[in-house]
Amino acid sequence: MSAKFLCCLPLRLGVLIISFLQFLLFGGLAGLTWYALWYDHKSDLSQLTKSMQKTAIAVGVIYTVASLLGLLGFLGAIFRKNGFVKSFYILLCIVFGFEIGSSIMYLVTFYRTRNQTFDDCVGGSTDVNKISYCRSLDIYRKIPQGYMIASIIIPILIHAYAIYVVYQYSKRLAHQKAEKTRLSSHAAYQPVAHQDDSFAMNQPYNAAYPYAAGGAHSFGHTHGDNKV
C-alpha cells in the first residue's frame, strides 16, 4: 500500500499543510525578530548590547531562510517540482538534528538543576543575581518529569513524521518523472499497413489469390464434367 498523509489523505496535501505552517511560523518569528531590532535601533534608549544584536540578527536570518524554504516546499507541492520539495526536506532534516541535540542538552540541564541544592548553587557567592537565580530552582523541582519529557518527545515525533511525509512525496515525484522519461523514450506506435482480407495471410501481399478472381478456381464455378 502506498504511503498516505494521516493514513488516508494524499501526500501532496500533507506537504502543502506542513510547508505552509512552517512558512507562517518561521515567517512570523522572523518578522518579530526584525521588528524588535528595528524598534531597538529607532529607540533613544537601546536595550540590546552589541553581542545581543548580533545574536538577534543571526536568529532573524535563520528564521527568514527557514520561512523561504517552507515557501519553496509549498510551491514545489503545488507545481510538483521535486527540486523545491527536496530543498524543503533537507531543511527539515537539518532542523531535526538541531532539535534532537538541543533536547538532549535541555534534559541534561533540567536534571542537573533539579537535583542541585541552594547551597551548591550559590557556592558562597554574594552576587544578588546569582542568589535570586538559585532561589528560583524550586520551580524546576515542581515541574512533573512526565510533562517535561512529553513536551520534548511529542514535538520530535511530529517533526519526524513531517520528514517522512515530505520524503515519501519527493520519492513519488522522482518515480513519476522516471516513469515519464521511460515512456517518452519508447518509439511511437506504428500501425500495421492495411491488407485486403481476400488475400491469404501466408502469401505475399501482391500474390494472386486464385479463389478471389474469376476463373476455374473461383467460388461458385462448376466444371463441365459435373453437369448432369
Image (cartoon, rainbow, N blue to C red):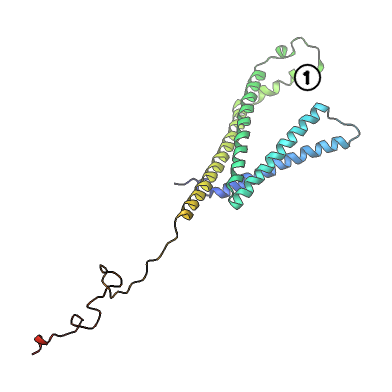
Question: In the figure, 30 relative to 139: above or below?
Answer: below
Identify the residue shown where x is 73% and y is 33%.
59
Identify the residue shown where x is 36% and y is 71%.
194
Question: In the figure, 176 relative to 226: above or below?
Answer: above
Q: Position of residue 82 (x, y in %)?
A: 57, 46
Identify the residue shown where x is 89% and y is 35%.
43
Rendering quarter of residue 26: top right
Identify the residue shown where x is 23% and y is 83%.
214
Q: Position of residue 76 (x, y in %)?
A: 61, 48
Is 26 or 157 nearer to us in this picture? 26
Farthest residue, direction top: 124
Question: In the figure, 228 relative to 104: above or below?
Answer: below
Circle 1 sits in a helix, a strand or a loop, which is it? Answer: helix
Farthest residue, direction right: 44
Q: Quadrant of the C terminus?
A: bottom left
| Label 1 environment density (alpha carbons within 10 Å; few <14, some 14–19, many ≥20) | few
Mark 1 belongs to which amino acid?
Ser
Q: Is residue 157 left or right of residue 138?
A: left
Is 57 or 195 nearer to us in this picture? 195
Rendering quarter of residue 211: bottom left
Q: Is residue 64 left or right of residue 220?
A: right
Is 158 or 199 nearer to us in this picture? 199
Q: Is residue 87 left or right of residue 210?
A: right
Q: Position of residue 180 (x, y in %)?
A: 49, 53
Residue under pointer 1: 132
